[in-house]
Image (cartoon, grey):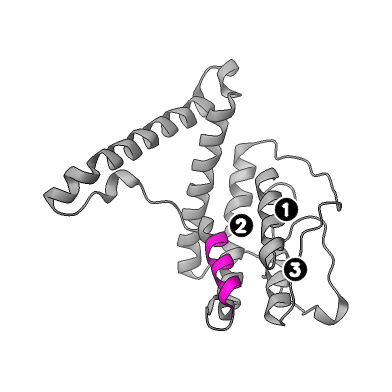
């Protein structure tokens, strides 16, 4: 959340916030009705930008939310939110046009890149022998970093209780959980699945 809020502050400084969360308000003339399957936190801000206005982050607006009590609930929530975000992006794909929206199309593309799972760097080694010699150490370093991240994530999941709270291990585990949820959501999106109903605060 700290990272997301910092990102929203920067987006407000250069243009418009891509999406909002928790506490939000919108001017009545800018509101546009939505279908039940659409994600308000994402669709409404995009509708505002589509009308030539901008959305800004207000740090003084605060709320408190309970954390999920299990990784399973967090995973199911991430799959649901990512799936609905992909559909929102499809519905508002006009905003990806760099001719009409030069800055915001870049913001939207870069911000929503998290909806696409990361590809393993270790599997991307291609090119001729000379290029491999020059850049081989880069791929080796990336592959080693991925292995370390996977081991830390495994430690957070199955390691000793006193080590599971290690912040770096938790971050690695959360990153892998997000990528797995994104991959599942992307497959469901390509199949045409939509999720309208869910049990609040349970994923």
Front tag of 2 and 1: 2
Front tag of 3 and 2: 3
Q: Are marks 3 and 2 in contact (CB under 8 Å)?
A: no
Residue 131, above or below 39: above
Residue 199 circle label: 1
Between disc 2 and disc 1, whose residue precedes? 2
Question: What segment carries the magenta color?
Answer: 101-112
Residue under label 3: 55
Pick the front one: 119 or 4: 4
Residue under label 2: 80
Q: Secondary structure at mark 3?
A: loop
Pick the front one: 64 or 75: 64
Label 2 neighbour load within 10 Å: few <14, some 14-19, many 20+: many
Front tag of 1 and 3: 3
Q: Quadrant of the N terminus?
A: top right
Residue 103 located within the stretch drawn in magenta: yes
Between disc 1 and disc 3, whose residue precedes? 3
Between disc 3 and disc 2, whose residue precedes? 3
Q: Position of residue 123 (x, y in %)?
A: 28, 47
Please indicate whether residue 117 sits to the left or right of residue 33 in the image: left
Pick the front one: 18 or 191: 18
Residue 189 located within the stretch drawn in magenta: no
Label 1 neighbour load within 10 Å: few <14, some 14-19, many 20+: few
Q: Are marks 1 and 3 in contact (CB under 8 Å)?
A: no
């Amino acid at each position: 959340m700290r990272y997301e809020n910092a990102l929203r502050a920067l987006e407000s400084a250069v243009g418009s916030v891509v999406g909002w969360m928790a506490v939000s308000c919108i001017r009545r003339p800018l509101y546009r009705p939505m279908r039940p399957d659409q994600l308000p936190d994402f669709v409404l801000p995009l509708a505002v930008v589509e009308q030539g206005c901008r959305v800004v982050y207000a740090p003084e607006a605060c709320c408190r939310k309970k954390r999920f009590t299990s990784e399973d609930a967090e995973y199911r929530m991430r799959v649901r939110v990512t799936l609905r975000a992909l559909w929102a992006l499809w519905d508002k794909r006009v905003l990806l046009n760099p001719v009409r929206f030069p800055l915001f199309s870049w913001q939207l593309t870069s911000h929503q890149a998290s909806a696409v799972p990361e590809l393993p760097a270790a599997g991307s080694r291609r090119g001729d022998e000379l290029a491999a010699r020059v850049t081989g150490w880069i791929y080796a370093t990336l592959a080693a970093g991925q292995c370390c991240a996977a081991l830390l994530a495994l430690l957070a999941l199955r390691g000793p209780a006193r080590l599971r709270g290690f912040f770096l291990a938790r971050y690695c585990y959360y990153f892998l959980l997000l990528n797995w949820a994104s991959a599942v959501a992307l497959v469901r999106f390509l199949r045409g699945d939509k999720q309208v109903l869910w049990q609040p605060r349970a994923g």
